[in-house]
Amino acid sequence: MNDLPHRPLSPAGTMRRRELLARAAQMGIALPALSALGAACGSSSSSSSPPSSSGPPKGTAVLLNYQGWMGKHTVADFETAYPGAGIKQASLGSISSGAVVPQIKANMSTYDAALGDQAVTGQGVAADIIQPLDWSKIPNIKNVDEKFRSAYTHGIPTDYGKTGIGYRTDLVSDPINSWADLWNLAPKYSGKIVFTDLDRDCIGSALRYKGYSVNTTNQDELNQALQALIEIKPHLQALKSYNIGQGLAQGSYAIAMDWDYDIALAQQDNPHIKWVLPSEGASAYLEGFFAVKDTPQIEVLEAFFNFFLEPKQYADFVNTTGTAFVSNAATPYIDKTIAQNPALIVDPATLANVEFENYLGEATAAYNKLWDQFKSA
């Protein structure tokens, strides 16, 4: 994903990060590492000077991140504000979330911090690769809304995304307000519906439809979600892992299970697209930056994390990526096309209706089996 100027790229442009993750997982492709990776590894934490306990932080921290997933000016502004401190970004060859922790575990002296969602941090805690932070050094954590802070405790939350429904009001004559509406209307709009081809998001949506948690480990509840997916599958035009909103804007289909940011982007191209946060609730991912255990660059990282969460700097990140945001304090500086979009806005009613996907541990196998059964049905 490339840096974006003041709004997300058009659907014909670079894919959004979540879409890229899904596509790579499906197709088994990998992104090339950033050109900075070699330099980053050459100046990794193991070869940097230990941080000083007095005065401004000094040293270079290596951040494992998705390409372009940073404010356009954030790193440069940080390095200007903290002479002697630096951030080098490196991208993982494989962009599967499951590859992050093993990569760090095998290269503990290479990386000082990483981007990861709750599934990654849960796996990271189990693998003992996460360094606790000194929150007194990160006072700007107060700018992050409480639900995100309490859910993402091993680092600083950066962004989230929820799975809901987008539909064309000029092509669908019936109102859609819930997952139940979508399932009930599927026969009427058979062949005009697309679901996301990402296992946790799709399964989580079916679980919410049946009234269950997106993190359930109850096999009976998982079986009901599977039956619901098999029931609606004959009415699906396709499962898609990227450019879902683009097809909705073009009228290739009329209804889509899709992510909030993708619908928000598509709405800029077609005003007939409506976003729905289903009344039963939605599955959501929440991710952020965390420090790698025993990094000698912890002072640099804590300074950077605090700098990142300063409202204007955080707004730069949101405006660059177009993501749903986790800090209302930054709203005055966020582009109105993002801040005022109902699909992306952060409010108590919305947050009360989303459930974040957590690390499932041994139950991951049950979800993998369910997904295989659905895909082969």
Image (cartoon, rainbow, N blue to C red):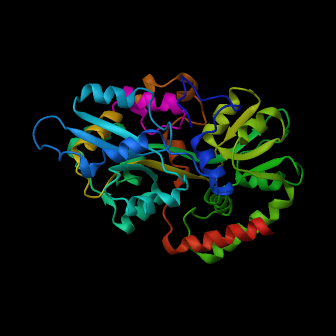
Is-magenta flag for residue 8?
A: no
Tell me which residue sits at (76%, 40%) in the image: 167
Q: Percent x, y for residue 175? A: 78, 41
Mostly what secondary structure, the magenta segment? helix
At x 64%, y 59%, the residue is 208
Left or right for 3, reference 122: right
Q: Position of residue 79 (x, y in %)?
A: 29, 29
The residue shown at (52%, 28%) is 339
124 vs 250, left or right, is left
Where in the figure is residue 261, as x and y percent of width and height? 60, 38
Residue 72 x %, y %? 45, 27
Taking the spot 54% from the left edge, 54% from the top edge, the residue there is 94
Q: Where are the magenta residues, as a range?
A: 310-329
Magenta includes 328? yes
For residue 149, side relative to residue 320 (left or right):
left
Is residue 269 or residue 146 the one in the foreground?
A: 269
Whether residue 314 is visible: yes
Q: Quadrant of the C terminus?
A: bottom right
Which image quadrant for residue 128?
bottom left
Of residues 279 and 104, which is closer to you in this image? 104
Q: Is residue 116 above or below residue 274?
A: below
Q: Give the vertical position of 80 relative to 363 (above or below).
A: above
